[in-house]
Image (cartoon, rainbow, N blue to C red):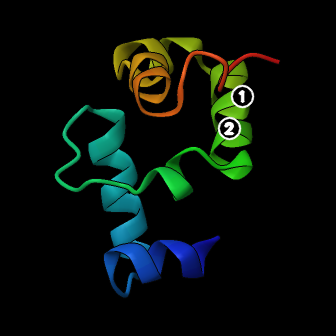
Amino acid sequence: MLTDVENALSSINLNDIFSSASQIANGQSSFDIPSSILCSDCVKEAFNIINSADPSLVQQANVTGELTDACGASFLSA
C-alpha cells in the first residue's frame, strides 16, 4: 500500500505522512489521492478504526462525505 501511494504521489517519508494526515484531518488536503488508493480496503479499515475510536474526528473532517463522494455510497457500509 505504501509503495502504491509513493508511486501515485512521489517519494514520501514519515514526516510527509504525519503532515498529510494532519491536513486531511483538518480538511486541508492539497493533493488528490487516486481512487485506487483512496477506495482501498486498507483505507476503509483505517476509517472504521478511527471512527470507532473517535467519531467526532471523522465528523469534524467530513471524512464520511469525502469518502462517499469519491468511492460511492456503498464504500463505508459493512
Q: Could you say which disc has been placed on residue 48 in the image?
A: 1
The residues tagged by marks 1 and 2 sit, at their Cα atoms, a distance apart of: 6 Å
Residue 5: percent from the left, percent from the top?
Answer: 48, 71
Most foreground residue, 63 or 71:
71
Position in image of residue 63 (x %, y %): 44, 25
Which quadrant would residue 25 be assigned to in this image? top left
Q: What amino acid type is highlighted by mark number 2?
A: Lys
7 up-or-down from 27: above or below: below
**Quick check: marks 1 and 2 in contact, CB under 8 Å?**
yes
Please determine whether, in this image, residue 38 is positioned above or below residue 5: above
Q: Amino acid at mark 1?
A: Asn
Q: Is residue 70 left or right of residue 53?
A: left
Q: What secondary structure is found at the residue carrying circle 1?
A: helix
Q: Which mark is residue 44?
A: 2
Q: Is residue 74 left or right of residue 24?
A: right
Q: Quadrant of residue 16?
A: bottom left
